Image: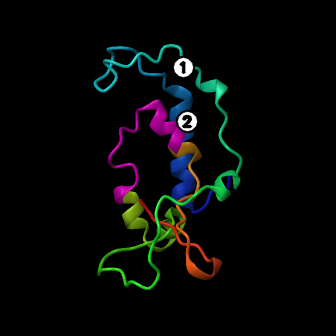
Amino acid sequence: MASGTPLLAERRQQAARRAQELELPTFKSRPGWEFTDISGLDLAAFEPGAPGEADGAAPLFDLPSAAPLPDGVIVSTIEQAAQERPELIERHLGSLVEAQDLFVARNEAGFENRARPPHPGGARRGRAG
């Protein structure tokens, strides 16, 4: 997995360290998990996909290339946004989830620049989110 920008590389490293330290939530131990028993879940049995493995996946949505975007709307990959607008990434990436959650930490440690809607002529664009 490419580390990308220093900002994202550091976030991935911090998340990987958290993932090593955190445990699965236990039944009734935390709000949001009080009705979900995952005691039998073996996360070690799941390996991350290889880089590029999801390239053939169907896009989640189509972005019309002819329609201009409204003022203030930015469409890019997370990597591109981290390079061009790091203040947005620092302020928003991970802001809606709890960092001390094993699933969040594992996802952030291994996420890749994947959101890429199709674009005419074979070029692809992604959406920072």
Q: Position of residue 93 (x, y in %)?
A: 40, 54
Tell me, for residue 41, which label it has, or none.
1
Q: Amino acid at mark 2?
A: Arg
Residue beneath label 2, please? 17
Does residue 34 lie above or below 126 as drawn? above
- Quadrant in which the C terminus is drawn: bottom left
Q: Amino acid at mark 1?
A: Leu
Visual colour scheme: rainbow
Q: Position of residue 96 (x, y in %)?
A: 32, 46
- SS class, disc 2: helix
The residue located at (34%, 49%) in the rendering is 95
Task: Looking at the picture, tell me which residue is in the foreground, 79 or 38.
Answer: 38
Whole-Å distance between the Cαs marked 2 and 1?
20 Å
The span picked out in magenta is 91-107
Q: Position of residue 73 (x, y in %)?
A: 34, 74
- SS class, disc 1: loop
